[in-house]
Image: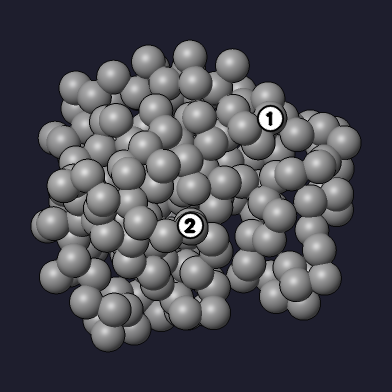
Amino acid sequence: MEAPHSPAADAAPARLPDRPAVRLTVETPERMRELGRGLAALLRPGDLVMLTGELGAGKTTLTRGLGEGLGVRGAVTSPTFVIARVHPSLVGGPALVHVDAYRLGGGLDEMEDLDLDVSLPDSVVVVEWGDGKVEELSDDRLHVVIHRAVGADTNADTNADTEADPGADGADGVGGADERRTVTLTGFGSRWSDADLAALAVQAH
C-alpha cells in the first residue's frame, strides 16, 4: 500500500549552516557578558544576530556585552515594550539595533514598520525571539541559542515583571542556583564561513 502523500515532502529543505556549530559552556552571567564582548569583536556593519532561549536564559545579558564591546551609547536592556531600540556608536563603529520580536506573531511583513532592512547595512542588528520571523532579512546571519544547564533553577532569575510579561528577559540569568548555560553559535552564509567562532571559548570560561 502506498504511503499517504505529505505536503511537507514538497517543502524546500532547510538551509544548512556554512560551517559546523560551535557549542560553549558559560558558567556565570559575567562570563555571558564577556562572551558578548568577545563576539562584538567579530561583528561588523550588516551583521544579523538571532538570539534564541527561554525566559531568563541570558539573551539580554549577552546583548549587553555586545553593546559594551561595540562601544554604543545607552544601557542595553530588554526592548520588549518598545519592540526595538537603537544604540548609536560612541566610537565610530556600527550602531546596535536591539529588537524583541516576541509579540510579533507574523513573519517579515509584520516587521516592515521597524525598517530593519534599512538599518541592517549600517548596523549590527540583534533580534531576540526572531526564529521564523527575520531570516528573510539576510542570507548571512548568526544564530545564537542559549540553553540552561541541566538542573538549573528555572525560577531563580525571574521577577514580578518577567512573570507578568513572558517577552521580557528581566534579571536574565542572574542569581540562579545553577547559572551555567550552553550557548550554540551557528553561522549561515558566506559571511560566517571563515569566522573563528571557536575562539570565543576563552570568553565563556
On screen, residue 107 above or below 21 = below
Q: Residue at x 54, y 61 (%)?
A: 77
**Residue 178: image location, x then y, percent:** 82, 32
Q: Quadrant of residue 123?
A: bottom left
Tell me which residue sits at (41%, 80%) in the image: 106
Visible residue check, residue 164: yes
Could you say whether the residue bearing mark 2 is in a helix, strand or loop? loop
- The kind of residue tagged 2 is Val
- Are discs 1 and 2 less than 8 Å apart at CB? no
* Mark 2, other Cα within 10 Å: few <14 / some 14–19 / many ≥20: many
Tell me where residue 146 appears, x and y as whole percent: 57, 41
Instruction: Indicate the amino acid at tag 1.
Output: Thr
Q: CA distance from mark 1 to mark 2?
A: 18 Å
The residue identified by callout 2 is 76
Residue 17 visible at all: no
Q: Residue at x 37, y 15 (%)?
A: 199
Above or below, 85 relative to 146: below
Where is the C terminus found, in terms of image quarters? top right
Q: Is residue 112 above or below residue 68?
A: below
Q: Which mark is residue 16?
A: none
Q: Is residue 165 left or right of residue 116?
A: right
Q: Residues within 10 Å of mark 1 (few under 14, many from 20)?
A: many
In the picture provided, is 143 more to the left or to the right than 162?
Answer: left
Q: How many marks?
A: 2
Dot 1 corresponds to which residue?
28
